[in-house]
Image (tube, rainbow, N blue to C red):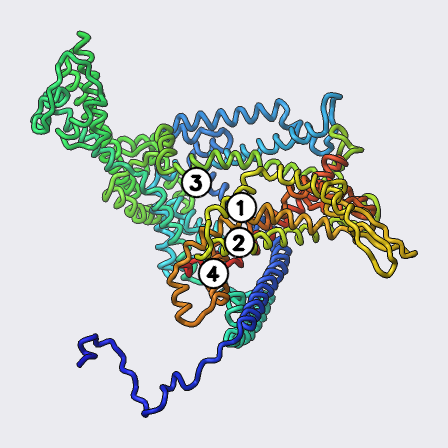
Amino acid sequence: MEQEQNGSDLTPVAATPEGTAPSSLSAPVTIEPWYTRMGWSIVESLLKLGVFLLGIILDVLKAIISIVVGIFVGIYKGAIAIYKFFRKGYRIFREVDWAGKLSFLIQGAGPIHDGQIVDGIIFMAIEALFILFLVTGGIASIGRLGSLAPLTKKDTSVYVLIRGLVALFVCVAYLIVYILGIKLTYDDYQIVHNYDFHQARADQLNVLGNLDEYEMIDFKKDGYLKIRKIMRHHYGYSKLSARYISYVPFKRLGVHKENPIAAWWWNLKSKIHAKYVIWVTKVRAGKWASAWGRFLDWEIVKPESKYGYDAVVGEVTKEYNAFRHTYDKYNDYLATSRDLRSVCAVLSKPELILRSVYAEDEVSRSNNLTPIDHSEKVKAKDIVSRLVGTFEIPLATARLVARLAAKGIQKEKAGKGDALAFLNDAHDHYQKQLDDFVETYGTKELEAVHGCESAYRDYVPLRPFYDQGKAAFKGALVNAYHLTAHDAEMVYQDYALAIKHTEDSEHETREELLLRAEHYHQLVLLYENAPLHGAPVHFKKEIKMFADERFAVSVLALPVLGALLTCVIPLLFSIIIAFTNYDRDHTSGTFTWSWSAISQFFAGNGTGSTSIASAFGKILLWTLIWAFFATFTNYIFGIVLALLINKKDIKLKKMWRTLFVITIAIPQFITLLTMNLLLSKDGPVNAWLMTQTWYTSSTGLSHTLSLGSFDSSGTWNAWAFPFISGTGAENSDTIWPKMTLILVNMWIGIPYTMLSTSGILMNIPEDLYESSRIDGAGAWTQFWKITMPYVIFVTGPSLLTTFIGNINNFNVIFFLTGGGPTVAGRLSNAGAGNTDLLITWLYKLTVNKYDYATASVIGIAVFLVCSFFSLIVYGRLGSTQNEEEFQ
């Protein structure tokens, strides 16, 4: 009864014999010592780190293989892409009208023909400027790139190279503009002749759906020219439809016979993957599943085949849908006619317009608007809102009528006419414009397509006109069938082609033209359902689009241009310099193309210039070691410091954070220069150490507190503590300067990590810790199972960025050690010190040795190293692989 009152969710405790304890108390849980649990946590963490590094190594090997294979695949795909590019250009040239064909020679001819006057003039001006640039020195600048030889004493090889690169850049830019101009011309042509292209693409699907009806064609063997000819003559398709039908990849309709080498390779991968899946299943079921799990995901997916009937139909359907999505929106017949009718409807009530202008209409009165004095100046922008309320019209229509009303009132006040008469004249003007628009793009076009269909059917009455000549035949079509000049030319060509193909056989000619009429009837239905007014976007609207749907392009244009000028072009220039002999002996005025820098880079061990290769390996190793320790020491100790400060029993948290933030407030180079003075050979730290003595009982001698070595006679060679400088063998005495660099970098970098991780730690849900404490987890388990995974997940990308930044950490090395100590050996011969990173070595090669070519090679190597690590490690971060799992 008591249980029912307290709640039905209570679980009763099972009764136990008197004098015995419950089973949960009879066998106490054995808790491992803290050091055992900590040891296993460390082992598991090291295992995870090892697996992570192993995964990176495997990714590196896979990337190298992919690069090698990708080079050959890229060459093949590039050749295919170039072929498709020129094939596409040839097809466009064949499809467009005379203005479009002229655009291939004179840019802008097509847009001007289609009404885009400003666009056409811009393209023409760009082409004229490009030709002028080539004639006035562009061609000469490109030609001189081959030798880089200056023509005059004032000229230099650098200027020759820069001018040549600028000329190439201008040529590439113009090529892009040229392609855009051709695309604009073709787009305009498809917009104006939208229904023709609709029908052509629909005919593609019609043929694919009825392949058995075309017995005269062997689609798997016949070429596209033969298919086009048969579709044109024997099945009566239009020129455009026959052309598009021939574009269909009929040879891919059957089952593709797979390459035996590709089949063997795929079978081998499948067998290896099957065994791999079995092994992964066992590993994931083992003890270390949590450590290995997410690093063992390897899936192989066979690409979808482009062969087979369904694949070809899907490809053609996709292209048809893309065409409709792109070009159907430019048919603005309904929108234009609707807007003109709206304007005419408003202008048909001029008195109401004027009352609305002066807020004397019923709507203005109901809105308690004060009438406007007729003597006041009327502005169009002030009238718009009242017109919208009075006539309930769109904003664009209201703006147009407001401008007309303001102009009429202005003329009336100036004594040049009457406002009502002006508005009536405007109504007549727009009514005529509406009537002309409907007649041109509605009535006349519909009559024209009906006339074309009738002209194909009326072979007998039209044949005498055909025999009289082209002009008489086209005149009869225009007068009797109301065809446009363009349509009359099309019908004449079809008649001539049919007569020639059938050898002037009346019966066969009539049959071929009747087939053409039957196909053309589908185009007639399109015009009957909806008239066509394909209107290309004009320049003014294009400019407005950059503030609307193309606003992203406007915003990104300036940053992209800045990145191009400050990053891409200097990088390309640096890459090009690597293929020259630009150095101290070959100044900016005399260097030429050469493989000397690259050959030095890949040369074996040696002295002088040949030591570049061996020095690179040594400096690269130290660079990676430095980046690893400089990153992870700051990261780990920063997290530990943040945890200590964030502990609940720590007092004065703000004070401790402020003390560490002070190290950030002081400029980094000042801190580094101060450390340089303190830790140098003659600095106060070493001066103090030299005053300290220590006693050895074996010799009874006192020595200064310093590091050094005994010589062969047992004499101690004392020298200052080598924090940042030293002498001796190349590989013996550089450990202390390198350790000093890491320690000083910790002093600089730990506060940054402490600040960033403090915010993360304060946002970890407290529920996780409470739940873990209920389950018996201690502080160490909470740290490894909750805190660290959470922090690493959030800071993973930032950690990678810091690692890449430390590879290029110029400040710490340059201001603290200057790359020293410099010891005789391979590094010294290559112009580097024992603590130089790749980036500081590059600086020394440029500033001290003037070896710009070798420095460019090193710069390329640094770029490859950074990009390689960035792409590979970023793909293995939990933040990118399991982003959806983060709560």
Instruction: Determine the CA span between mark 2 and mark 3.
Output: 72 Å
Judge depth for marks 1 and 3 and give the one in front.
1
The mark found on residue 95 in the picture is 3
Q: Are marks 4 and 2 in contact (CB under 8 Å)?
A: no
402 displayed left or right of 236: left
Q: Residue at x 83, y 54 (%)?
A: 709
Instruction: Determine the CA span between mark 1 and mark 3.
Output: 72 Å
Residue 315 position, x and y percent, is 42, 55
Foreground: 355 or 746? 746
Q: Earlier in the sequence, mark 4 or mark 2?
A: 2
- The amino acid pointed to by label 1 is Phe
Instruction: Determine the CA span between mark 4 and mark 2.
Output: 14 Å
- Where does the C terminus fall, quadrant-wise? bottom left
Q: On the image, which quarter does residue 382 sit in? A: top left
Q: Earlier in the sequence, mark 4 or mark 3?
A: 3
Foreground: 332 or 569? 569
Residue 134 position, x and y percent, is 60, 26
231 displayed left or right of 297: left
Q: Residues within 10 Å of mark 3 (few under 14, many from 20)?
A: some
Foreground: 229 or 532? 532
**Residue bearing mark 2:** 641
- Where does the N terminus fall, quadrant-wise? bottom left
The mark found on residue 787 in the picture is 4
Secondary structure category for the residue under label 2: helix
